[in-house]
């Protein structure tokens, strides 16, 4: 597994699980969050592997901060080739309670942050003449319009699907693949904060929550050579929620 940058990495979340799976497959990782992940978390990511893990701070609502992250990440791991932008927030507000401030905050983290992280990363790969892979994090809400976790959240995740396909079409000729994972009800702190999430999980055809590890395995598949003929794809990981 090639060296990978993962944003939005905190204890026991999807970003952490992705980093751990990459390390287990021998890939070095650069992990980032608003507060740089602590040494203890880096040790959890690399325990029992030969991989290296580096920690960097980033505010994905600031393009300058994203650029600083990318510059530092390529300094730490010069062979960096993979990206998983996991930084994201939800805001389980009722549709008529969404204010411009709440709308802008969700869009700034989920859509602005993903777009400019992918843009800067892809630019560096093109400049280096290096192939690579990106696996973005969308949501089943981006497929269905959502409701419980906020219509602005759903709109941001639909945007992630669109930008992923756009980057895939624009940079496939450079050997850069961009795909997306659209998880459903995942057993994580973010999902647990959404009212009615347990009932939604039980109502899926598989009748359960998904796990952060199932999302991580899907993302790592999209980074690997096993998916070498895939780009612009969206993998639905939702227990059948989208098809039901």
Image: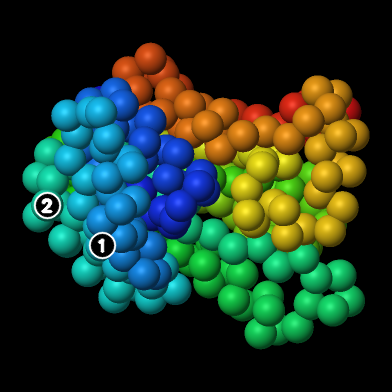
Residue positioned 68% across, 75% down in the render: 103
Task: Say above or below: 210 vs 100.
Answer: above
Q: Which corner quadrant holds the N terminus?
A: top left
Q: Which of the 4 quarters of the picture holds residue 78?
A: top left
Determine whether, in the image, residue 151 is placed left or right of residue 71. right
Residue 157 visible in the displayed image: yes
- As helix, strand or loop, the secondary structure at mark 2 comes to helix
- Tell me the tag on residue 56: 1
Compared to residue 67, the image places residue 13 above or below, namely above
**Other-residue count near label 1 (Cα within 10 Å), few / some / many at <14 / 14–19 / ≥20:** many
- 152 and 18: which one is in front? 18
**Which of these two is toward me, 48 or 171?**
48
Identity of the residue drawn at 26% across and 37% down? 46
Circle 1 SS class? strand
Task: Check the picture and name the quadrant holding the C terminus.
Answer: top right
Residue 74 locus on image (x, y percent) = 15, 52
Nearer to us in this view, 177 or 216:
216
Q: Residue 56's spot in the image, x, y percent?
A: 25, 62
How are the colours assigned in the image? rainbow
Q: Are marks 2 and 1 in contact (CB under 8 Å)?
A: yes
Q: Is residue 233 visible?
A: no
- The residue located at (42%, 38%) in the rendering is 18
In the rendered structure, find residue 76 and report the number of the disc placed on it.
2
The picture places residue 22, in percent across and down from the top left corner, at: 33, 32
């Amino acid at each position: 597994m090639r060296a990978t940058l993962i944003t939005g990495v905190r204890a026991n979340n999807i970003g952490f699980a992705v980093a751990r799976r990459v390390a287990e497959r021998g890939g070095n990782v650069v992990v980032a969050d608003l507060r740089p992940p602590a040494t203890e978390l880096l040790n959890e990511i690399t325990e029992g592997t030969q991989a290296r893990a580096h920690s960097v701070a980033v505010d994905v609502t600031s393009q300058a901060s994203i650029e600083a992250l990318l510059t530092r990440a390529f300094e730490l791991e010069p062979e960096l080739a993979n990206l998983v932008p996991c930084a994201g927030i939800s805001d389980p507000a009722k549709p008529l309670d969404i204010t411009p401030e709440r709308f802008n905050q969700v869009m700034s983290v989920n859509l602005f942050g993903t777009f400019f992280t992918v843009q800067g990363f892809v630019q560096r790969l093109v400049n280096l003449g290096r192939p690579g892979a990106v696996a973005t994090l969308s949501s089943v809400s981006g497929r269905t319009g959502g409701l419980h976790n906020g219509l602005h959240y759903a709109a941001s995740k639909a945007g992630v699907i669109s930008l992923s396909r756009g980057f895939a079409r624009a940079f496939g000729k450079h050997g850069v693949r961009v795909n997306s994972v659209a998880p459903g009800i995942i057993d994580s702190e973010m999902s647990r904060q959404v009212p009615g999430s347990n009932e939604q999980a039980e109502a899926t055809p598989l009748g359960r929550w998904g796990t952060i590890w199932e999302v991580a395995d899907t993302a790592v598949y999209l980074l690997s050579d096993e998916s070498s003929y895939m780009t612009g794809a969206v993998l639905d990981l939702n227990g059948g929620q989208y098809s039901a």
